Image: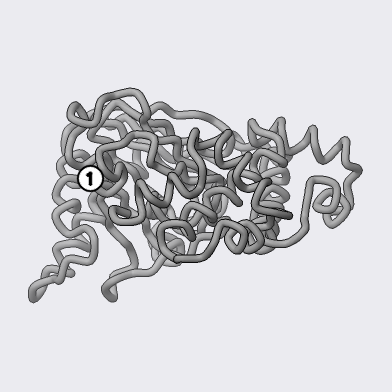
Amino acid sequence: MSDMQSKDISYEVVHYHTELPFKILNVHKKDLYPNKDLSAVSDVLDHWHNELEIVYSYSDDGEYFTDGIAHPLKKGLFIIVNTRSIHKVISNRTTPYDKLPPTLTTVLQISDSFLRNYIPNFDELYFIPVFKPGEERPAEIMKDLAQYADGKPLTKYENMRLLGLVHELLYFICKDDLSLKDTEMPEKSRKNADILRKIISYTEENYDGAINEMSVAETFGYSASYFSRFFKSNMGITYKEFLTRMRVNAAKDSLVQTQKSVLEIAMDCGFSDSRGLINMFNKLEGITPLQYRKKYAETV
């Protein structure tokens, strides 16, 4: 899972802050909700990466979607995102800020090459997305790992301790949560996921240009009607909605990180004019771009 205030991406490159083959991060409510405003958060759009992602939730709010299936977050629940699985995060917008815990989730992303060294036939296996351990130890490990999140410097020999914790956690998950990929994800579903990854990556690379549903359908060799049905049935939203959300989220970043005019930002993000950005921004965010800049530029 990426930083929830960063630009939405298709293929995520995971950077490791040490020589260890994994990354640990905590998602804190103070970072996710500027000014304690639940409406300020940008949901993480559908994306994928090669790493295995293990999420531990401290709250009952938000949803993780993996390969099109929604998994409501619950306190003490593990969500496993398989390597190359398309996933997204829908953040809480109902529970009052003061009732949320300081840390919402701890996320562990593990290199797929590291996993292949220890798990035979790795590419033929599939982790069940909702992991419900029958004992307390996996939760204890995630809480322990959380202390090392966000690039915290390691003291001498702590890298060995961290490796041991990750190995132990993987032991619990592998013994209880692994299944054959053919059983859990039939060949047709895997092929659809491969196509969707390519469409998402293409959109992220070209959303700032003059692309639309028809042009993308043509790029991938589909009729407009088939492409529309395929995308909606697999992603839950239309391609137009997906593209618009990506463009608006990119505009939100520019509004708080630059001093560019609304027209410049609109053109940078693939809108034909400022009015198009203003209209869609109002529809999705409930305020104008300039109101958003005034509200969040000093806090995000």
Residue 276: image location, x then y, percent: 68, 46
In the depicted structure, whether residue 108 falls above or below residue 160: above
Q: Name the element at disc 1.
A: helix
Colour scheme shown: one colour
Q: Is residue 166 above or below residue 45?
A: below
- Residue 227 position within the rendered picture, expressed as x and y whole percent measured from the top left: 82, 41
Judged left or right of residue 55, residue 90 is right
Front-most of 122 and 277?
A: 277
Amino acid marked by disc 1: Lys
Report the residue marked by disc 1. 30
Please tell me whether residue 270 is drawn above or below residue 37 in the rendered image: below
The quadrant holding residue 135 is top left
Q: Is residue 279 above or below residue 211?
A: above
Say which residue appears at 88% left-offset and 46% top-offset: 222
Q: How many marks?
A: 1
Occupied quadrant, residue 165: bottom left
Identify the residue at horizontal 47%, vertical 45% (top origin).
Answer: 44
Residue at image position (53%, 45%) is 45
Residue 36 image offset from top left, x and y in percent: 25, 38
Q: Nearer the viewer, residue 269 or 56?
A: 269
Residue 117 x/y as whole percent? 41, 65
